[in-house]
Amino acid sequence: MGTVHRLVTEEQRKRELLSRIPDNQLGCRLRHKWPVLRPGRKNPIPKNMRVLAQRDGCARIQETCEICGKIRWKLTGQHGIFLRSAPWHYIQPKDWEVLRRDWGVTRQDLAAEAYERVFGSWIGDFIEIELNKMEAEEREKMRQEMHREALQSS
């Protein structure tokens, strides 16, 4: 019995944490809109991407998410050689809602929250309208049936 209570509390805590995340951050936690490189174009470097020279001959490639403003960057090797193994580093926007790993919020939780925000009220309204239509149709059928019975008995 205590385990069930803890699970409910855990779920309530997740819902509360997820409710604090602004809409633009929620969508970005599932997939950021990082710049897309387009080789062969007149200007192949997108506007939300910068390349900054470093003193040691390396370059810092910096990208900004168009939606939430989060920045990611990585260093190249000397002379701008792209190092696939170099890690990305992230700079959060000032209003970024930090979710610690030990809070147990998963990508599935984030996706469920996003779908709930987008479709939750809309689907609820749709279902209510459809149920009302069905009830009205049933009432009309009952009225017609009662009318038929009344005509047959007279």
Image: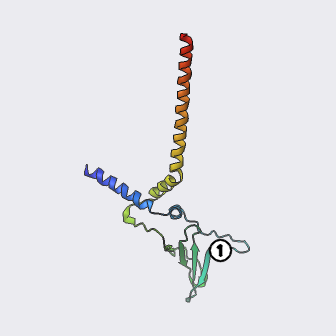
Determine which residue is flagged by label 1: 47
Image position, residue 28 (x, y; %): 53, 64
Mark 1, other Cα within 10 Å: few <14 / some 14–19 / many ≥20:
few
Outermost residue, front direction? 154
Image position, residue 57 (x, y; %): 58, 87
Instruction: Locate the C terminus by quadrant.
Output: top right
Outermost residue, bottom direction? 55
Q: Residue at x 41, y 57 (%)?
A: 15
Q: Quadrant of residue 141?
A: top right
Q: Secondary structure at mark 1?
A: loop
Left or right for 19, reference 47: left
Q: Quadrant of residue 32?
A: bottom right
Image position, residue 29 (x, y; %): 50, 63
Image position, residue 25 (x, y; %): 51, 65
Left or right for 8, reference 85: left
State the residue in front, 69 or 142.
142
Q: Residue at x 45, y 68 (%)?
A: 97
Q: Residue at x 52, y 32 (%)?
A: 135
Compared with residue 150, is residue 103 higher up or lower down, i.e. above or below? below
State the residue in front, 102 or 25.
25
Compared with residue 89, is residue 121 higher up or lower down, i.e. above or below? above
The chosen color scheme is: rainbow
State the residue in front, 86 or 61.
61
Q: Residue at x 54, y 15 (%)?
A: 150
Left or right for 20, reference 54: left
Outermost residue, top direction? 154
State the residue in front, 63 or 95.
95
- Please state which amino acid type lies under the numbered disc 1: Lys
Image mark count = 1
Outermost residue, left direction? 2
